Amino acid sequence: MNTVMIERGCFLGLATSAIEAYNRETNGFVLGNEGTRTIRARPRTITVLRAAYPLQTEDRKPNWVSHGNERAFRRARGAVENLDVGYRVLGGFHSHTGDDGDANLSPTDLDYVADELRRIGRTREPDGAAWLEVVLALRRRTWTRPHDVGWTPRRYKRKLGCTLAITPDQGFDMTIGGYWVHARPDGSPGRWDVTGTEEATLVLPWSV
């Protein structure tokens, strides 16, 4: 469970969703399944993120994002849960923007995850659940020296990092973190308590 591979299409969806909404936060669902991949010459069972679905009707601000249209959110949630394409909802993603944003979970983020588990808790195991929250920290960059348009990866122990040059003189620094949030019912119908978090090791298909 600790290793999470972000497939190319999902990586593209995460990055473009965060860049499009900047300097406001974005959010959505991540979908995938378990898979076997060879990592450091050994086959391993890992979590594979196949798709990222950005929510389009949210209320976005520079420091937070919330469900602006509850009925639209329920339609989106029903679609990603019930369209049988071989993937399941593993969790969600959201961005942190600006110079003070980082790719870590805040107490507010944990409250948000607990609320999401309440919303879709009927599809989770009755004794507990693990929700994967992907956090993208995005900072706008302006360069005096021209950069090649494209992206350059940076290596971290668990997180993913890259520099995205949209034009030769403007782009973004992006860092992605992934966190398994463990929760269990608190005794009230539909209510969940967060019991702990665990940072995942994120990898890309072309980096292992």
Image: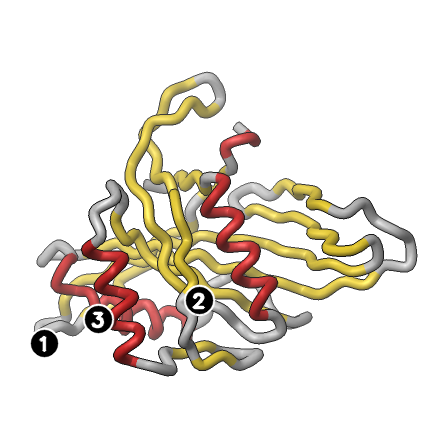
Look at the image and tell me in which quarter the N terminus lies.
top left
Report, in whole angstroms, how far the alpha carbon at label 1 lies from the one at label 3.
13 Å
Mark 1, Cα crowd under 10 Å, few <14 / some 14-19 / many 20+, is: few
Q: Residue 153 location in percent, x, y?
A: 66, 42
Residue 27, numbered label: 2
Residue 188, numbered label: 1
Q: Quadrant of residue 128?
A: bottom left
Q: Residue 114 location in percent, x, y?
A: 28, 70
CB atoms of marks 1 and 3 within 8 Å: no
Q: Amino acid at mark 2?
A: Asn
Quick check: 85 left or right of 93? left
Q: Nearer the viewer, mark 2 or mark 1?
A: 2
Q: Amino acid at mark 1?
A: Ser
Q: Amino acid at mark 3?
A: Arg
Report, in whole angstroms, how far the alpha carbon at label 2 lies from the one at label 1.
27 Å
Residue ID at (51%, 47%): 11
Q: Quadrant of residue 45?
A: top left
Residue 119, numbered label: 3
- Secondary structure type for disc 2: strand
Q: Earlier in the sequence, mark 2 or mark 1?
A: 2
Q: Residue furthest top?
A: 41
Report, in whole angstroms, how far the alpha carbon at label 2 lies from the one at label 3.
16 Å
Please determine whether, in this image, residue 157 is positioned above or below residue 190. Answer: above
- Residue nearest the observer in this picture, 146 or 106: 146
Residue ID at (27%, 44%): 87
Please determine whether, in this image, residue 55 is positioned above or below residue 88. Answer: below
